[in-house]
Amino acid sequence: MESISGLLAELRRDAVNRDAAAMAKTAHRLAGTALCGGAVRLGEICRAVETKVSDVGPSDMLDMVAAAEAAIADLRVETAKFTTLLPCLRGDGASSSPAPAGAAMA
């Protein structure tokens, strides 16, 4: 599987170079990598880039890259939350006792 960070850098480079065809190919590869890893929002954004990039101007290309970057930033935050919570889910964390019945999870 290709590196999401590397593909994102390539996508930004394609946008800066105003190369819609290269951007569509990179977005396709990034979407495949994202969807394979379960990053659905990022995959959907990249699929939209792939299909719409030839119809937009240079500033819109950079906006598309910014949307992908935001999705990756959100993914990193969620991954950090999950990593912190994982020991509790496995039962080897300090807070491994089950929540009271009816308690809402954040």
Image (cartoon, grey):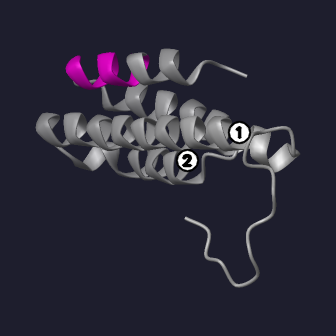
Q: Earlier in the sequence, mark 2 or mark 1?
A: 1
Residue at image coords 21%, 41%: 63
Q: Residues within 10 Å of mark 1 (few under 14, many from 20)?
A: few
Quadrant position of the N terminus in the picture: top right
Q: Which residues are magenta?
A: 10-17
Give SS at disc 1. Answer: loop
Residue at image coords 59%, 31%: 29
The residue at which mark 2 appears reads as: 43
Depth check, mark 2 against mark 1: the one in front is 1
**Contact? badges 2 and 1 (CB < 8 Å):** no
Give SS at disc 2. Answer: helix
Q: Residues within 10 Å of mark 2 (few under 14, many from 20)?
A: many
The residue at which mark 1 appears reads as: 37
Q: Decide if residue 58 is on the left or right side of residue 17.
A: left
Q: Is residue 103 above or below residue 55?
A: below
Q: Is residue 43 above or below residue 28?
A: below
